Image (cartoon, rainbow, N blue to C red):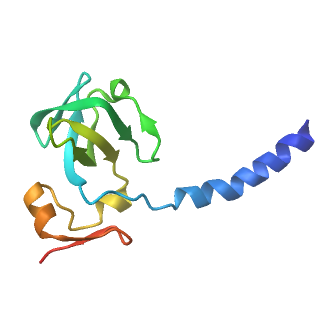
Amino acid sequence: MLRCVLPALLAASFVLPAAAQVQRSFPATALRGEVQFGTPPELLLNGKPARLAPGARIRGENNMLQMSGALVNVKAVVHYTVERQSGLLLDIWVLTPDEMRVKPWPVNDAQATSWTFDPAAQTWARP
């Protein structure tokens, strides 16, 4: 039994540090904001009431999917996308401290349309 567990633990020790260093890719439509999760599907986005879209995806700092019910009363800095037709939040990524340091990042549509996004570097440039 020990012969089976030891190689698995050894392999995991090489894979986990590498996985932790993977940079997440955010779409050019992602805006930055502060969310306080409420009773699903309700939340506050930048202090204003908002709602999650049906099928909304919330990814934690570890990029794993999180259930909105487990995040009630949690505040976080996030990147998010909005469903254009309904105005509901579709995708939310809870940011890591390193991701929060990437500046500038647009906080509204006007900034996103006037700034230039480099998807490879995951950075924005103001005009």
The image position of residue 97, as x and y in percent, is: 35, 57
Quarter of the image that includes the N terminus: top right
The image position of residue 59, as x and y in percent, is: 39, 42
| 77 on left or right of 21 | left
Q: Residue 40 lies in what quarter of the image? A: top left
The image position of residue 70, as x and y in percent, is: 37, 26
At horizontal 24% and vertical 67% (from top left) the residue drawn is: 103
The residue lying furthest to the front in this view is 85
At horizontal 29% and vertical 26% (from top left) the residue drawn is: 72
The image position of residue 104, as x and y in percent, is: 20, 68
- Number of labels in the image equals 0
| 12 on left or right of 19 | right
Whether 120 is drawn above or below 16: the answer is: below
Whether 49 is drawn above or below 5: the answer is: above
Whether 53 is drawn above or below 99: the answer is: above
At horizontal 83% and vertical 41% (from top left) the residue drawn is: 5
The residue lying furthest to the bottom in this view is 127
Q: Residue 14 lies in what quarter of the image? A: bottom right
Whether 72 is drawn above or below 65: the answer is: above
Quarter of the image that includes the C terminus: bottom left
Identify which residue, 48 or 125, lies in the foreground.
Answer: 125
Identify which residue, 107 or 90, lies in the foreground.
Answer: 90
